[in-house]
Amino acid sequence: MAIQHLIEQSKVPKPIIVESGSTAATSAFTFLPFGAVLNQPPKRYLVRGMVGRDELTMLFGDSKAGKSLVILDMAAALVRGAGLFAEAFEVYDPITVCYATGEGQRGLPNRFRALENKWRFTEEERERFITVPEIPNIFDEDEPRAVANFVTEFKERYGDRLRGGLLIIDTFARAAAGADENTAKDTTVMLEHLSEAQRELGCSILVLHHAGHSGRLRGSSNIQAAFDAVLAVRQDTSGDLFLGCSVAKDAGDAPDAQFAIRVHTWLDEEGMEQTGGYIDWLGTAKPNQVRKSEAQRTAAEISELLQERATSEAAAVTAKAVAEWMQNTITEKTAGKALKTLSDNPSSVFKAKQKPVTGSDGKQNRNAWHYWAEVGE
């Protein structure tokens, strides 16, 4: 309510009306002077430093790394409100959360039982937590479960209850049935549909996605570019699990929250043992600690690629080529740093060899250096 009041009271001008003869036509563009932009409400969050209000957020990670459990715990924090998520990130007034899931539906009751055991929800909090076992399709407009139909049905049943709240879609792949997530053409359509649903419902949307073989966001590069924030569940080399903000367009350097997956056990009515997973938060770590682990993973992946594809000087490649091999999930600069690390720190079975390239000015062009694998016996 307070945010809506700020919007109504702001000095942002209405869209310009263009007179065309005797017919008034609404302009497709809004032209804002600098001062009008300053008078707009500042950025607001559902989860401070992670999930912005009225924004699109994505969380990705490896399978079985706890993505869905993390999001359920976030949903619990949001329907309760006025506290902390992951014991580190502030949440504000309680909101409505709608969780659309096609993942692990058979295990969903057990997950909810474990979540209830941890949070001990009130009836009001339960009312704010709406679950939809079907995933809205964000690609095919003619599919009965198209996201536009989802928006219509939700509003018919619940009105504006999701305004200011959060819609969770678990997962992007299931919501993208019929599309190729690796092509910009298809993903652009999906992202436009997501944005339209976000505007119609007046909520934030958080989408879960899987990591690719490289451990990075799977699919076309324009997926990451379209989201206001990208969260990542990572596992470091020692097996510790972390939740962090991989990309945040308008946020500072937030800490990474370490967590463990615990199991709640109970006996059902027939005396059979049942189990459900939940998240136990273990504190925060400095982002550079996790990034160091990420850099080690990148170097290891590049090492494997060189040993597979560039095993001689004749087959030597540049950092740019390596970045392309990894489907541009890393930059050329990052690939260059990893290659330099590998060449400076040879292992007992592998050594990255450098082939400097000298320019017309007689100087070596580091960006053009070529690398290949020299495998030990």
Image (cartoon, rainbow, N blue to C red):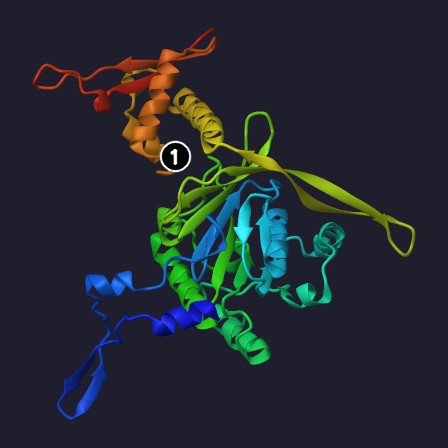
What element does badge 1 sit on? loop
Foreground residue, 112 or 366? 112
Seen at 74% across and 50% down, the residue is: 114
Q: Residue furthest top?
A: 377
Callout 1: 10 Å neighbours few (<14), some, many (20+)? Answer: some
Q: In this rendering, would 295 be left or right of 335?
A: right
Q: Looking at the image, which residue sits at the far bottom? A: 22
Let me know if residue 158 appears in the view: yes
- Residue 20: percent from left, percent from top: 14, 86
Is 165 placed left or right of 181 in the picture? Answer: right
Residue 345's x, y, as percent? 40, 12
Depth order, front residue of 305/73 = 73
Q: Is residue 23 left or right of residue 334?
A: left
What residue lies at 54% left-to-right and 58% top-to-bottom?
92
- For the residue pair 18 and 11, the one nearer the viewer reads as 11
* Residue pointed to by mark 1: 326
* 237, above or below 155, in the image: above
Residue 173 x/y as whole percent: 51, 53
Question: With respect to residue 209, does 260 lie above or below?
Answer: above
Where does residue 30 sit, x and y in percent of width and height? 23, 70
- The number of discs equals 1
Q: Quadrant of residue 40?
A: bottom left
Whether residue 311 is visible, yes or no, is: no
Q: Nearer the viewer, residue 174 or 288?
A: 288
- Residue 163 against residue 332 in the figure, above or below: below
Looking at the image, which residue is at 41% across and 25% down? 302
Q: Residue furthest left?
A: 361
Q: Going 34% across and 32% down the picture, which residue do you hit?
A: 323
Residue type for callout 1: Met
